[in-house]
């Protein structure tokens, strides 16, 4: 029953662009909402290859296109970004301020809290945890739909646990993510249903076969040159892998193809979109992010990935069309991304650099402790050379004052630091409003601030400073997480059969997605409950938003 769905989606041929039929726009609510997040699919990446789309991305550009969407907050990481897409709320309201934050009052030695863990479970830590949506403070669209009508089915499938959990929410019927070479797993602790068992079997069969790599599309030819970063050489890959190489499978277009196959099979097996009430499925496609971190965003690897993504999305939508489902799609991203400095320097940007090792938390702790007259003492905690910093709980009030003063003096004097905000500064700032492209850094920081989870200082690096330091042995070569537009800007695309398309180049936010979808299905959402606003998806006269 499911194998033909998988076969139809994996490694498809290019899908020809479909002309929009001359038919009236739908007047009734869609039966199925398909919410897709492409991890690290920046607005820049979307625009760079737009002229080459021929499959699913081409179809979506025929709908309502917002090429200048914003993950408007400062903490442009995976978990915060996914928490905004289907809640209508910024991280300051969702509580998901980062992938990891610190709880220095936690009894366990590991004070870092992973955004999708339940740290109350015995033995849980930020690396080996019990996955859970316990930290999400607001309902998702699926949760609101289910509250209004318990018959609504809510399904979430993704390559990462935090993507599936933050988009599905705590009341989802099915939440699945790629848990390893054995396939997809769930936090709900339910017995593996036949559908998932079949998908995992098919994935195992695919993994057991070697992949000779993908052909290089013509638009990727100019990207095909090697770049050295530490001990790594990137830029010319084709995703060839040996049989059984799970890491190679995960960091490749194969992962997204399998996730879309899973989603299509779930829609068919559960009959989503075929009952009286609307259903919703969220799909987190994680390969673009893994590829961006591992190879950067401007080599053959990223170029091939976008091409394969376009093809696989086209096959996925074709499958839904053949099933006759009345569905509406939104596609966006949890954040953008920035290419590795070494390639930027080869391509007309000599000022690009990696962060100084002196700004890593370990080095900062030593330097600040010495300057504050507390040598050898733990004074500051952090997860990396940018973002939230926390003062140790063991400091006396006088020591804390000295540590803060020395930290601010040291950081603000560093040439790679754009600014450092104190907790008090951020907390005193009103929640931002107005066009997200005009916000100050302090307003962006406020959109990420949670009084229970945020740090004592917020360190923001200058633009064009990669927050991965120079290392002889390089793990990830590129990343995101900054408050700059390379990481904040993402596409937001809405599509439904027969809708009249339009393009709006002005800035909107990902928190606008949820109220816009809620309006399509006639679900009321109090404006005071969210940060986003409803976007009118009807071109010209008419308004899809409640008045």
Image (tube, rainbow, N blue to C red):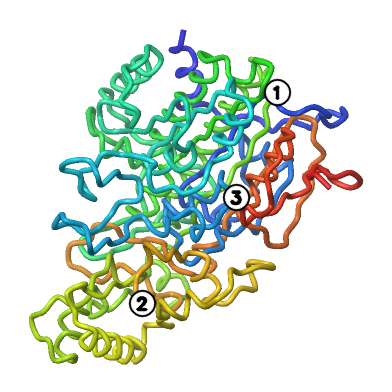
> How many C-alpha atoms fall within 10 Å of the one at disc 1: few (<14), some, or many (≥20)?
some
As rendered, which of 177 and 303 lies closer to the eye? 177
> What label sits on residue 88 in the rendered view?
3
Q: Is residue 56 above or below residue 447?
A: above
Classify mark 3: helix, strand or loop: loop
Left or right of 523 in this view: 232:
left
> What label sits on residue 439 in the rendered view?
none
Q: Is residue 485 above or below residue 139?
A: below
Classify mark 1: helix, strand or loop: loop
Q: Is residue 359 above or below residue 513?
A: below
Left or right of 460 in this view: 206:
left
| Chain-order first, disc 2 or disc 3 | 3
Name the residue tied to disc 2. Answer: 457
Classify mark 2: helix, strand or loop: strand
Q: Residue at x 63, y 49 (%)?
A: 492
Task: Give x and y (percent) for residue 539.
Answer: 84, 45
How many angstroms separate mark 3 from mark 1 (CA)?
24 Å
Q: Quadrant of residue 364?
A: bottom left
| Chain-order first, disc 3 or disc 1 | 3
> What label sits on residue 326 in the rendered view?
1
Q: Residue at x 29, y 33 (%)?
A: 179
Tell which tag, 1 or 2, sits nearer the viewer.
2
Q: Residue furthest right?
A: 541
Tell which tag, 3 or 1, sits nearer the viewer.
3
Q: Residue at x 50, y 35 (%)?
A: 283
């Amino acid at each position: 029953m499911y194998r033909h769905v998988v076969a139809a989606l994996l490694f498809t041929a290019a899908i020809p662009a479909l002309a929009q039929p001359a038919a009236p726009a739908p007047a009734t609510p869609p039966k199925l909402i398909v919410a897709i997040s492409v991890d690290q699919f920046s607005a820049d990446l979307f625009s760079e290859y737009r002229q080459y789309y021929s499959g699913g991305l081409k179809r979506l550009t025929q709908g309502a296109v917002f090429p200048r969407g914003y993950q408007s907050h400062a903490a442009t990481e995976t978990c915060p970004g996914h928490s905004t897409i289907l809640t209508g709320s910024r991280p300051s309201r969702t509580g998901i301020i980062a992938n990891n934050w610190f709880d220095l009052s936690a009894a366990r030695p590991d004070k870092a809290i992973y955004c999708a863990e339940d740290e109350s479970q015995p033995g849980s830590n930020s690396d080996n945890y019990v996955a859970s949506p316990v930290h999400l403070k607001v309902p998702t669209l699926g949760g609101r739909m289910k509250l209004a009508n318990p018959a609504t089915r809510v399904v979430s499938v993704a390559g990462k646990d935090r993507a599936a959990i933050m988009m599905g929410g705590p009341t989802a019927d099915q939440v699945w993510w790629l848990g390893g070479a054995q396939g997809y797993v769930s936090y709900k602790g339910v017995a593996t249903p036949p559908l998932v068992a079949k998908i995992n079997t098919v994935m195992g069969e695919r993994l057991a076969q070697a992949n000779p790599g993908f052909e290089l599309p013509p638009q990727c030819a100019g990207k095909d040159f090697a770049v050295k970063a530490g001990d790594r050489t990137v830029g010319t890959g084709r995703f060839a892998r040996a049989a059984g190489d799970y890491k190679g499978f995960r960091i490749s277009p194969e992962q997204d193809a399998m996730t879309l196959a899973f989603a299509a099979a779930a829609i068919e097996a559960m009959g989503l979109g075929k009952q009286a009430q609307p259903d919703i499925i969220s799909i987190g496609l994680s390969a673009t992010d893994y590829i961006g971190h591992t190879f950067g965003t401007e080599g053959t690897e990223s170029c091939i990935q976008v091409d394969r993504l376009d093809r696989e999305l086209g096959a996925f939508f074709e499958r839904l069309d053949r099933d006759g489902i009345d569905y509406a799609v939104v596609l966006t991203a949890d954040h953008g991304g920035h290419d590795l400095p070494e390639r930027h320097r080869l391509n007309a940007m000599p000022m690009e650099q990696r962060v100084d090792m002196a700004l890593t938390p370990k080095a900062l702790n030593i330097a600040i402790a010495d300057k504050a007259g507390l040598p050898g003492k733990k004074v500051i905690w952090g997860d990396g050379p940018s973002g939230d910093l926390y003062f140790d709980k063991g400091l006396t009030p006088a020591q804390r004052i000295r540590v803060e003063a020395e930290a601010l003096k040291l950081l603000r004097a560093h040439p790679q630091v754009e600014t450092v905000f104190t907790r008090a500064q951020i907390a005193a700032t009103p929640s931002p409003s107005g066009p997200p492209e005009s916000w100050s850094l302090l307003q962006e920081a406020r959109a990420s601030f949670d009084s229970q989870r945020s740090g004592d200082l917020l360190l923001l690096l200058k633009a064009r400073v990669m927050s991965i330091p120079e290392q002889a042995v390089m793990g990830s070569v590129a990343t995101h997480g900054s408050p700059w537009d390379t990481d904040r800007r993402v596409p937001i695309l809405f599509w439904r059969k027969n809708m009249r398309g339009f393009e709006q180049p002005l800035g909107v936010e990902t928190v606008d997605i949820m109220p816009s979808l809620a309006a399509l299905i006639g679900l009321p959402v109090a404006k005071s409950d969210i940060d986003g606003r409803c976007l009118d998806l009807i071109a010209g006269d008419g308004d899809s938003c409640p008045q």
